[in-house]
Amino acid sequence: MDFRKIKGTIILAAACAVFPSCTKTIGYSVVLWGDESNGLEDGDIVKVIVKSNITHSYIIELPEGQGNKEIPIWQVSEPEGKKSALRMAAAYADFANKYAEVKLDGLPIRAEPVNTAKQVYRLRAKEIIRVLYKGKGAAVSNGKGTIDGEWYRVLTADGTQGWCFSHNLDIYDSETGGRREKAASEKKGETDKLLQILRGKKWVPAEYEDLIKAKRIDLDRFDEQYGFTFDEQTGKLSILTADGQNEQTFTKIRKITGKQYRFEGASVTATINGDDDITVQYMENGKPKNVKFSTTKEDIPALIKNERSRRIREIQKIAGFGPTFSSSNYGTLTITPANGSFSFTWQNTKLLSDSKIIESGARGSGTVSVKYYLSKQLQSSYDGILTFRFDGSASENNFIYKMTEKGIRLEDAGGASIKNNVVNSRGQSPAVIFLEKR
């Protein structure tokens, strides 16, 4: 690419077709650190659509109609008007594709082009950095005389910018030097430890921790297959939760900034929040989505098995006490086991239908289960909540119940407040049905 003629790619695809909430772009940015896998070259001008403050990234349009891509904020310049971006690209043109290999371990990057300025970063020997442009700075001496070199504005592979004196830099052109890929290699020390955390643990949805503490194993949200998994040998990853599954392929894992890692070739980024806590961001239907995952010492399959057994025991207790309950007004209810679950028959449901407690097309049979939990406040007055699925009905019918010496009291929960599968409050003036044990 001839940057003196400013042949940087300006992407003009219609971003708002993918991001419906977008009314205008943020602006245009100059690519500071190219990414060959995305077709981005140093000095390209790209259209920036969305900024994420959560993962410190932009959504940009890729060259040649390749669609949209999430990239770290540091990889491009601050978005601005197109003319300003063109001027910046021109200013950077002389150093397009210029990188440097560090020759001295501990070489500082400084806030200003002065050898006494604040150090903002310490480089490692063999580390690869991007050279943005040459600046004017103070001469550097070693006590014996002036040291040969120039001050350059540089950028590290994790997004730190500053000034570095070139005496201990081996500057080269990535188009001919063949060493650019070194910058994508993993750092030692903390980076390796963080990557090992990502690789070495089983990641389950973070909501599990709160549900386990509350002793509410929501079987609609718990599954032993749910979690964030990836295989570096096959290049496949999966984000599977109760809200759906997203499967993608990737080529490698690369640190991009701070504690953040990108799965190259996929729209997936993982941020290491702690030893047992990560946030995974990915693109779904053109929009960024964030899901938190954590580790747990609990045996998830055992928790699920125990919860299923608890629910069965709860209905068994009611069926064992009955199994038939009746009312002169609301008919006769019989609960019986059926292939690991429970079925029911409910004769004479006309009043239930006339009162619009159940749908008019509901037949007098179906299945009954335990699906929801009661809040602590309701637990002091009720035993639980039963979910009835009437044959011929498209919706479920829930009844808060209380066992008595003579039978069971059912309270219509159609108007109750239910959130996250927990009944927090009763409905206003609910119908109450008392069915006597027969």
Image (cartoon, grey):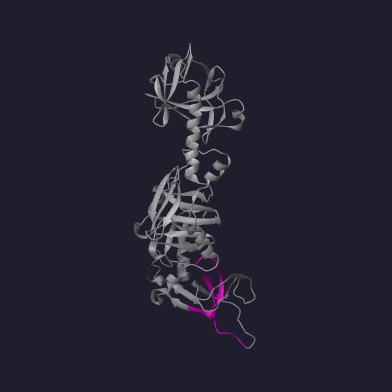
Task: Note whether 121 is above or below 272 in the view shown.
Answer: below
Q: In this view, does 284 lie to the left or right of 152?
A: left
Question: Residues in magenta?
Answer: 145-170
Q: Can residue 23 be seen in this view?
A: no
Residue at the limit of the structure toward the front, as seen here:
320
Q: Position of residue 282 (x, y in %)?
A: 45, 52
Point 59% across, 29% down: residue? 379
Residue at the limit of the structure toward the bottom, as seen here:
144
User: 26 or 405, which lies in front?
Assistant: 405
Q: Where is residue 340 in the image (x, y as percent from the top left)?
A: 41, 32
Q: Is residue 355 left or right of residue 140?
A: left
Point 49% across, 32% down: residue? 311
Q: Where is residue 77 in the image (x, y as percent from the top left)?
A: 50, 63
Q: Position of residue 218 (x, y in %)?
A: 50, 38
Residue 351 part of the magenta-drawn span: no
Task: Note whether 336 is above or below 273 in the view shown.
Answer: above
